[in-house]
Structure formats: structure tokens, C-alpha cells
Image (cartoon, coloured by chain):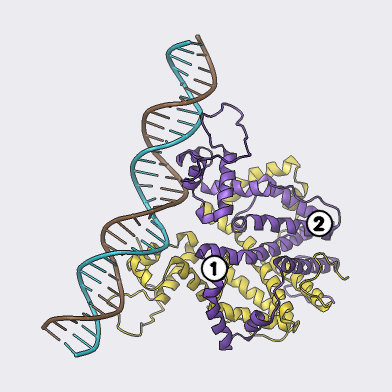
Chain colours: A purple, B yellow, C brown, D cyan
DNA sequence: CCGTTGTGAGAACACTGTATCCATAACTGG
DNA sequence: CCAGTTATGGATACAGTGTTCTCACAACGG
């Protein structure tokens, strides 16, 4: 069908021997794969599809990439390298906020990224760079590297979970092939029934009464909470391996 | 190969007409599917596999379940209904902690659950019950349903992200088919090279110097941070739709 | 005893990732 | 400028997948 025209930009030349027509090259393969996954989701990303878009044979890709799994690893690091990590200012709160926002932006820009990042240890150079910057931000809060590491882990865990929820609806739409309106229309009666049943009073209150801030506001609220929390823990001489249920200091 | 013996327990009889040999029934299908996904991961969960385990034909499953996707929805709610949600005590911090721990336990017991929960709105009866209990815990902290909802969202986002990281290594092992030792051995030299390069000083410090608390301790540390944070935000008259970068009150 | 109906499932379709194999295009030595 | 070698692209094949169509058979009502 389509895919006869080659994507503009990225005219990266291979170092030796120019290929006869349009050699795949790892970079072209990865870029194409990212484009497909961004536009149509991970389930649409098949080796045949990438090869077709690139105008090459399917089996040829395996000369540049060992497997689909390795391709995903390369995609992850390529995406993490699209932009530089934020520059550190020394203000731990501002820096950790910047790190969190950058990660969220990456996850939103590439909706497939979250489900792939969580699920494998990420050791590519760009991922390591981000990890290092995040640790740098946290060490301005506490010099204890163990504590700083867990502060970072906590903040990033929130970001992952938050964005996952943010993307849930969009993912469901893509999966079912319905638009948001269609989906709301199909689920609406069931929701009303659930509310009318009275079995879930607080869920009902939430659906009917609660305001609906923008996704940005929700994210920033939770992020501010998490940062408040780590600051409180760290300043009160917190250790990671504390008792399981230490009460808050207020 | 195996699968000729029927699983014990669950002798749920269909209400009308007893089937000739071993009618699938939705419950049996879902239970079998959960068992497969738990033991061998989501990728091993195929309709053919479930049917083979059940000793029935593949196509027969579609008489009880509309699609693989619907089966996953049923699996999610079945798993969420395995145990009752925690009973509320009125102590918001203890209750939210219990809710978070229960969710973590569910996610750890069924490693496939996280990637499926995030990615679809969850509206089954058991999921709704959990949502209602979580909101109940948070309304003891603040009567504002909007604020309570976002407190819950923040806590659960942390739990999802935290457990996802916790499971990452295990998932990678399953994917690559390596044991933990094999994986460490294969990655070790690369890690040492990364450290030796000096390009990622803080990452290097983390790997070499940082202590390694148990997963439980890491989870509890982050959870305590998050709960400290929401308490601080809420008590200081927090609103969700605040400015993007409101400083902490200390 | 027969007919109706509901149910299980065989076979097929359009996909997927991956391995094997081979003809050919491109580089290298002369 | 030609020949040899090697690297490379790709057709084909295999073992899977979710899903659907269709049909035969078993269990019920009469």
C-alpha cells in the first residue's frame, strides 16, 4: 500500500560502502519502529510492518537487529536520547520536578514507552544519563547515596504510575477502536446503573460531585505531595530501612 | 502434552443441563487463564493453551467469552475479588497503608496484573469495591471528595510504579529465559565498563556504595513519603488545582 | 419414539516472530 | 578493467497466534 516514499530528515550515511538502494541501517529501523509505535501502538509494531515501511524485506531486518526484543531495547534508548536531560541547578526540588516532568513528557509522547520501560532494566547510555541526572538532583537534598537513590525511586515510581493512569483511557480507546464519545456512550448506562445501585457510594460521589482538574494539575498535585513527603522524611533524619509503619512528624 | 488431569477444587455445576464431559464455563476458563498467566506469564496465555488445559476445543471458549480481551477483563476482576478489601478503621493513614499494601500484594501475586490494570479503565464489581474502600480511607483525611480522590490517585500511582519497578527484573528474566545469576553474569562486565568509564559517577556510586534494602523496606519508605506528603498538602488547605510549582511548607 | 435446539469443535483465515537458504550486488586484489 | 570473495537482501517456510464459519452431535420437550 503506502510506504513507497522515504521519510525525510535522517539521511544518516553508513560509514563504509553505500548500499545499493535503501539499506535499512539500525538507525532507520529504530526510527521507523518508533514512528509506527507512536502512531498505532505497540501491537501494530511488527517486523513485517517495519520492513514494509522501509521498503525492504522482512528477514533483512534481522541482519541489523537480533530480535524484536532487541529492537525494543534500542527504541527505548533512542527515545530517551531525543532530548537532553534537564540541567541541574542545585535546587533539589526544582531539579527533581524537572526530571519528573521530562520523564512524563517522554512517556506521554511515546505511549508505548511506559509498558516497556517497566518490565526491563534499562541500561542504555541515554537511560543511564537520565539516571545519573536524577541522582544528581537528589544528592542536593541528601548526600547519603542510599537515601538519594530511594528518593529518586519514589519520585519516578509516582511518575510511572501517574502517567500509566493518564494513558489508560487513551489505550483502551485504541484497543477497542472506539472514540472517546463512543466509549463514554457505551459505558455510560452501566456507570449510571452502578451509581444507582448504591453499593459504591463514594465512587458515585466521585463521579458525580468531584471536579475534574486537567491532567497537568493532577500530575503536579501528586508530584508536589511526593516531594513534600521525601523532604519531610529526609529532613527528619530518615532512613530507608525504618520500621514498616513509622508515623508522620507533624 | 500434560493437562489431561482436571484441576481439583472448583466443581461449580452449571445451573441447567449437565454437560457431556467437562463444559468450560466462564469461571473455569477464567481460573485456568489466571493460573497460566501466573505461572508462565501473559505471553503464554493463549486461547489454545487455555482450551488445551481445560481439555476442550479452542473454539468452544468463544461461546463463554467474547474475546481474549474480555477474558482479560474477567481475569482482572476475578483476581481483585480473591480477597476482601481491607476493613476501614477510620485512621486514614493506617487505612490508606492497608489499601496500598493490599494492591501491592495483588500485583506481586499476579505479575501480569499491573500491565493490564494500567491500560484499561477497570469497572468490574470487585475493582469498584476496592475503589470505594480506598476513597473511604481518604475521606477520613479530608471530606472534600475531589481532594480525597486525588489523594487516592496519588497513592495508587505510587504503588503501581513501585511494584512495576519491583517486578522489572523478574519480568526480564522470564523474557530472556535466564536465571538471575545468568543475567547478572551476562550484564556484569557491561556494568563494570559503564562504572569504569566515569561518565555516570552517581550511578556508579549507587551501584557500588548504596545499601540494598529489602523490597518491602523500599516500598514502605516510598509509601511513607507519599503519605507524609498528602498529609502536608491536605492539612495546609491544599487544593488540587494549585499553581504548578507551589513550594513546600516547612 | 422423533424433532428441535443449543452446544462443542474441526478447519480455515489472516496474521505474528524467526530461521534457513541462496542468488546477487558490492568491494578487493590484481 | 576484470575476477574472486564476501557481505547482504530477501523469498520461503515453520510454528505459533486470535478469531470466525460452519456443521455434526447430544440432550431436551413432546
Answer left or right for A149 relative to B162.
right
Left or right? Give the position of B65 relative to B156.
Answer: left
Examine the rendered structure and indicate whether residue A72 appears above or below residue B148: above
Indicate the secondary structure of the residue bearing disc 2: helix
Considering the image in quadrants, where does the N terminus of chain B appear?
Answer: bottom left
Give the mark toward the camera: 2 or 1: 2
Q: Position of residue B131 (x, y in %)?
A: 62, 78
Q: Determine the residue positioned at 47% across, 67% down.
A: B69
Q: Say if residue B58 shows up in the picture.
A: yes
Say which of C8 and A40 sits in front. A40
Q: Residues within 10 Å of mark 1 (few under 14, many from 20)?
A: some
Q: Tell me the tag on residue A95.
A: 2
Residue nearest the viewer, comparing A107 with B110:
A107
Contact between marks 2 and 1 (CB within 8 A): the answer is no
- Where's residue A127, x and y in %? 68, 49
Q: Residue A139 bears which disc, if any?
A: none
Image x and y of residue B67, in percent: 43, 67
Chain for numbered disc 1: B
User: Residue at label 1?
Assistant: B110
Q: Residue at horizontal 71%, vertical 77%?
A: A211
Using the rendered image of the protein, determine whether residue A144 is visible from the camera's viewpoint: no
Q: What x and y, as percent, mark residue B37? A: 48, 65
Quarter of the image for residue C6 reads bottom left
Whether A250 is drawn above or below A57: the answer is: below
Pick whichever, A9 or A59, lies toward us.
A9
Q: Are marks 2 and 1 on the same chain?
A: no
* Left or right: where A45 falls relative to A236: left
Report helix, strand or loop for mark 1. loop
Amino acid at each position: 500500500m503506502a510506504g513507497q516514499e522515504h521519510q525525510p530528515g535522517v539521511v544518516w550515511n553508513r560509514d563504509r560502502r553505500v548500499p545499493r538502494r535503501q539499506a535499512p541501517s539500525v538507525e532507520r529501523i529504530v526510527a521507523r519502529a518508533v514512528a509506527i509505535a507512536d502512531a498505532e501502538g505497540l501491537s501494530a509494531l511488527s517486523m513485517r510492518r517495519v520492513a514494509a515501511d522501509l521498503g525492504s524485506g522482512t528477514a533483512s531486518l534481522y541482519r541489523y537487529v537480533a530480535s524484536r526484543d532487541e529492537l525494543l531495547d534500542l527504541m527505548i534508548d533512542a527515545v530517551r536520547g531525543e532530548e537532553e536531560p534537564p540541567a541541574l541547578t542545585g535546587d533539589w526540588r526544582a531539579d527533581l520536578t524537572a526530571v519528573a516532568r521530562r520523564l512524563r513528557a517522554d512517556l506521554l509522547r511515546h505511549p508505548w514507552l511506559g509498558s516497556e520501560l517497566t518490565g526491563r532494566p534499562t541500561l542504555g547510555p541515554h537511560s543511564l544519563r537520565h539516571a545519573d541526572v536524577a541522582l544528581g538532583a537528589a544528592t542536593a537534598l541528601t548526600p547519603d547515596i542510599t537515601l538519594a537513590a530511594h528518593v529518586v525511586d519514589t519520585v519516578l515510581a509516582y511518575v510511572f504510575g501517574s502517567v500509566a493512569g493518564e494513558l489508560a483511557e487513551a489505550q483502551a480507546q485504541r484497543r477497542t477502536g472506539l472514540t472517546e464519545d463512543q466509549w463514554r456512550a457505551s459505558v455510560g448506562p452501566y456507570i449510571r446503573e452502578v451509581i444507582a445501585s448504591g453499593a459504591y457510594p463514594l465512587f458515585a460521589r466521585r463521579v458525580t460531585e468531584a471536579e475534574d482538574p486537567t491532567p497537568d494539575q493532577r500530575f503536579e498535585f501528586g508530584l508536589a505531595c511526593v516531594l513534600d513527603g521525601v523532604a519531610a522524611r529526609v529532613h527528619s533524619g530518615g532512613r530507608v530501612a525504618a520500621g514498616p509503619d513509622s508515623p508522620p512528624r507533624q
